[in-house]
Image (cartoon, helix red, strand yellow):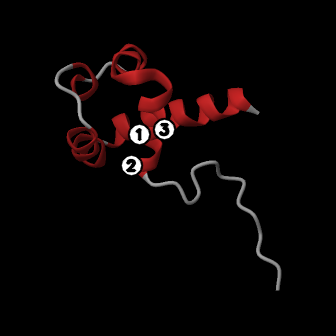
Amino acid sequence: MEQQKSNDPLHGKTLKFILEYLVEQYGWEGMAQRIRINCFAKDPSVNSSLTFLRKTPWARKKVEDLYISSIGKKR
């Protein structure tokens, strides 16, 4: 049986993976400039940001959209 490949760029990616990727690409300061939320601007950490993003769907969507646009630039 063949497995179908998902066209969803988020398929198989955890929120932690996405966040760490973006921090590596842009740094915390760059993240705060692109997505204006305090967890990126004031005393940022992966754990505190994950906690906020998991509770805040609109912020998570912005992070996921930034990830999708950043990997699109590499293709």
User: Helix, strand, or loop for circle 3?
Assistant: helix
Secondary structure under tag 1 reads helix
Q: Which corner quadrant holds the C terminus?
A: top right
Residue 2: where, in percent of width, then height? 82, 79
- Badge 2 amino acid: Lys
Q: Judging from the image, what secondary structure is the residue with disc 2 in?
A: helix
Q: Quadrant of residue 14?
A: bottom left
Residue at screen point 49% across, 39% down: 64
Q: Quadrant of residue 74?
A: top right
Q: Residues under labels 3 and 2: Cα distance? A: 8 Å
In the displayed structure, 14 sits above or below 33; it is below
In the rendered image, the residue lying farthest to the right is 2
Residue positioned 64% across, 48% down in the render: 9
The residue identified by callout 3 is 21
Q: CA distance from mark 1 to mark 3?
A: 5 Å
Contact between labelled residues 3 and 1, with CB atoms less than 8 Å apart: yes
**Circle 2/circle 1 CB separation < 8 Å:** yes
Q: Is residue 58 left or right of residue 8?
A: left
- Residue 40 vs 17, above or below: the answer is above
Q: Which residue is mark 1?
A: 19
- The amino acid pointed to by label 1 is Leu
Category of crowding for the residue at label 2, using alpha-carbon neighbours closer than 10 angstroms: few (below 14), some (14–19), many (at least 20): few
Left or right, 7 with reference to 50: right
Residue 47 percent across, percent down from the top left: 23, 44
Residue located 54% across and 35% down the image: 67
C-beta proximity under 8 Å, tags 3 and 2:
no
Q: Which residue is mark 2?
A: 16
User: Looking at the picture, how far across and down is residue 68, in whole percent?
Assistant: 59, 36
Mark 3 neighbour density, 10 Å: few (under 14) some (14–19) many (20 or more): some
Task: Indicate the position of residue 71 as horizontal and vertical percent values.
Answer: 64, 34
The mark found on residue 42 in the picture is none
- Which residue reaches farthest top? 33
